[in-house]
Image (tube, helix red, strand yellow):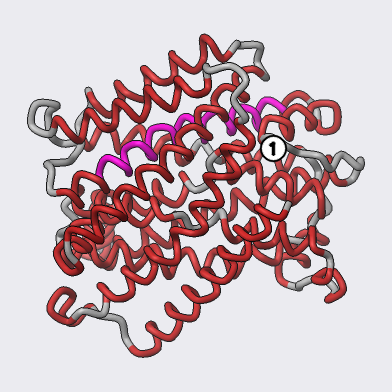
Amino acid sequence: MRRFLRRWKTRILIFAAVIGPGIITANVDNDAGGILTYSAAGAQFGHMLLWTMIPVTLALILIQELAARMGAITGKGLSDLIREEFGFRITFFMMLAILLINFGNVVTEFAGIAGSMELFGVKRIYSVPICAVIVWLIVVKGQYKSVEKVFLAASFFYITYIFAGVLAKPAWTSALLATVIPPDRHLFSDKSYVYMAIAVVGTTIAPWMQFYLQSSVVEKGITRRDYGISRLDVIAGCFFTDLVAWFIIVACAATLYLHGLRDIRQAADAAAALRPLAGDYAYILFALGLFNASLFAASILPLSTAYTVCEGLGFESGVGMKFSEAPVFYWLYTILIAAGAGVILTPSLPLIQISILSQAVNGVAIPFVLIFMLLLVNKKDLMGEFVNSRLYNILCWFTAGILMLLSLAYVWSLFRS
């Protein structure tokens, strides 16, 4: 019995030491843009898009597992590998594209901070600068372990959406059946329904996620010996983030859809609309969840960008380093936060159009990132025995192909709308 307990204690300690990158990366995907998409899906179509959650979760697990595996086996970030295997020129243009894409996303997150705080009566001229300073201090003044603990705490704060979903008193049987049974085929001839289905899938896997996950696996020091536990971290993160997405759709279906409130233009609109329908507690939980998600993503997205660009161009990077040891890394992080917050404080800017454009560019970029990942993970000299099996390759290329088609369709629909 003692040996059994000792073995399980050892496993739990190892899991606690490895857990983090997978859960953090997946949960940041439920940022202000993601919450807006899921809220709109529930408000416009009720439970009719819940069936997308299962394939979306499986696709997310497949892609995230590749990034975690490459980080653990090679000990290098994704942009570092792209530079070494495909040359500096390709890497430079990819880093430039990632920088522009992620800046648009950073602006969207600060818009989420502003919108969520305005629900509590706090003007953006106060909330945005204060949150920008908090985000900067967390990373620049912290060590990797302390920063990761803050991010993990923020990840589990998403449970507020689960509580909000329960308080909305949904039709549980209908929601569960809609999750496993697709709706009638006639809905797929509805352009607005197809557009929203593509949006739900398209917001799930963004280019920055793969770069951040692989870099954080490397910085955490996860090796091939720990890879099995790292895979559990990825699976747990993907499952939890899409469970949260499921509850956001369900909460909005039980309230907004049921009462005919279909026009959701910002994530804050969903929280405000919940108040008279589901009560103050659901409203507060939804609004707090939006604030947490936006602040969390406003920390991670600039950090992911700094990792990606510095690794790709050969500069020192890492939260474990001091400012003087990795000046380009920290200055890039600082500039992205200051510029993102500054844009939100600039009057008369079309923030909704900026958000839509950033999502469109994400959709264009993800096919290229996925192709590079699949080419790299199948290089025997890099991965050794950890290359993809034939079956795994079939699943990954099929998933990547579907995601590419959906992303391109999403971009096309954005410019036509």
Q: Residue 115: x percent and y percent?
A: 62, 24
The residue sitting at 81% across, 33% down in the picture is 278
Give the vertical position of 42 relative to 114 (above or below).
Answer: below
Residue situated in front as seen by the camera: 386 or 306 = 306
Tally of numbered tags: 1
Quarter holding the N terminus? bottom left
Residue drawn at 63 percent across, 40 percent down: 161
* Nearest the eye: 65 or 152: 65
Q: What secondary structure predominates along the stretch shown in magenta?
A: helix
- Whether 226 is drawn above or below 39: the answer is below
Q: Is residue 27 visible?
A: yes
Find residue 262 and report its image quarter. Answer: top right
Q: Is residue 199 magenta?
A: no
Q: Which residue is mark 1?
A: 164
Which residues are the magenta region? Answer: 282-307
Residue at 32%, 43% (x, y): give it: 304
Closest to the observer, 388 or 359: 359
Judge left or right: residue 397 versus residue 328.
right
Q: Determine the residue located farthest toward the bottom in the rendered image.
A: 390
Return the residue nearer the eye: 30 or 112: 112
| Secondary structure found at label 1 | helix
Query: Residue 107 vs residue 322: left or right?
Result: right
Binning the other alpha carbons within 10 Å of mark 1 as few (below 14), some (14 to 19) or many (20 upward) gives many
Instruction: Identify the residue at the far left of this view.
Output: 325
Which residue is painted at 14% across and 30% down in the image? 327
- Residue 162 picture location, percent across and down: 64, 43
- 408 lies left or right of 140: right
Q: Residue furthest right?
A: 259
Q: Name the side, left or right, on which 287 lies relative to 377.
A: right
